[in-house]
Amino acid sequence: MSPTLQPLPPDVVDDAVMAALDEDGASDDVTTRAVVDAAQWGRAVLLCRDEGVIAGLPVAAAAMTAIDQTVSFDTLVEDGTLVPPNTELAEIEGPLHAMLSCERVALNFLQRMSGVATLTREFVDAVAGTPARILDTRKTTPGLRHLERYSVRAGGGSNHRFNLASGVLIKDNHIAAARQAGIVDLAAVVARARAAAPHTLRIEIEVTNIDQLKEALEGNADVILLDNMGVDEIRTCVEMVAGRALIEASGGITLANVRAVAEAGVDFISVGRLTHSAPALDISLEFGGA
């Protein structure tokens, strides 16, 4: 594993793996029990058929060894590595029944996490040479946020706030609720948030037009999120902010336009599709060698 990629907490991995194995009925695999002799030994390799960035090998290892810890799992590459097609990722050996019962869960994690890492790398590469950083969002698979955000980091991206408790982000519905309570000006909304939040947290607010941006600046917001704006409007907003706040762009970001958004001068670009729409990487478990 890359020294800059912090490992997943072991309890997070264990909880995710055991929940997935239980969901899949791995301890009561009637097919394998009926067909495979309990003493039968097997060898296999994990083979990545696509080019992509690998993430999730420690999770796959935990899944493959969960039922029978005599299974050995030897990684051949590190998480965060960009591999060419037909790369062997790991060698696995042990009781065949355990390997077969855990195969699908291990592959599900590895394919999903590597898909997130690969899509993230494409966005990171697209903005290379600009100051902009690619961020994920909270649009994650329920229960798998730790794993998917780790995958974003494996792909070279950065993480936004982890959850609702870890950062102040005033969004459109918060603003609507404030207006219902008679607080119309965004500067006042920012001031209210700053008075109530811990002093260690930045105050970020979402704006959708120039007028809202002006109000957010009057309130001295620390970060301003430009939501669903075109590149020209983003560039105008950057000029207006003139370094008085950090700027995040979000909404409608694709590989086709992310470079232009970055070159408009924003500090961060948050992309929900990194975790909600990344295609799985084609990885298989091949018995008897590749």
Image (cartoon, rainbow, N blue to C red):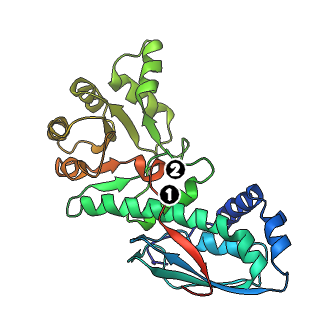
Place of residue 52 in the rendered image (x, y in percent of width and height, measured from the top left): 40, 69
- Residue named by callout 1: 149
Q: Quadrant of residue 187?
A: top left
Place of residue 147 in the rendered image (x, y in percent of width and height, measured from the top left): 56, 60
Cβ–Cβ below 8 Å for labels 2 and 1? yes
Q: Residue furthest front?
A: 35
Give the distance between the C-alpha atoms of the residues marked 2 and 1, in whole angstroms. Answer: 9 Å
Q: Nearer the viewer, residue 134 or 120?
A: 120
Residue beneath the point at 61% across and 69% down: 59
Place of residue 151 in the rendered image (x, y in percent of width and height, measured from the top left): 48, 63
Give left or right: position of 277 versus 211.
right
Q: Amino acid at mark 2?
A: Phe
Whichever of labels 2 and 1 marks the residue nearer the N terminus, that label is 1
Is residue 61 visible in this depiction of the protein?
yes
Residue beneath the point at 34% across and 24% down: 186
Residue beneath the point at 46% across and 13% down: 180
Q: Nearer the viewer, residue 278 or 169?
A: 278
- Residue named by callout 2: 162
Give left or right: position of 251 versus 67.
left
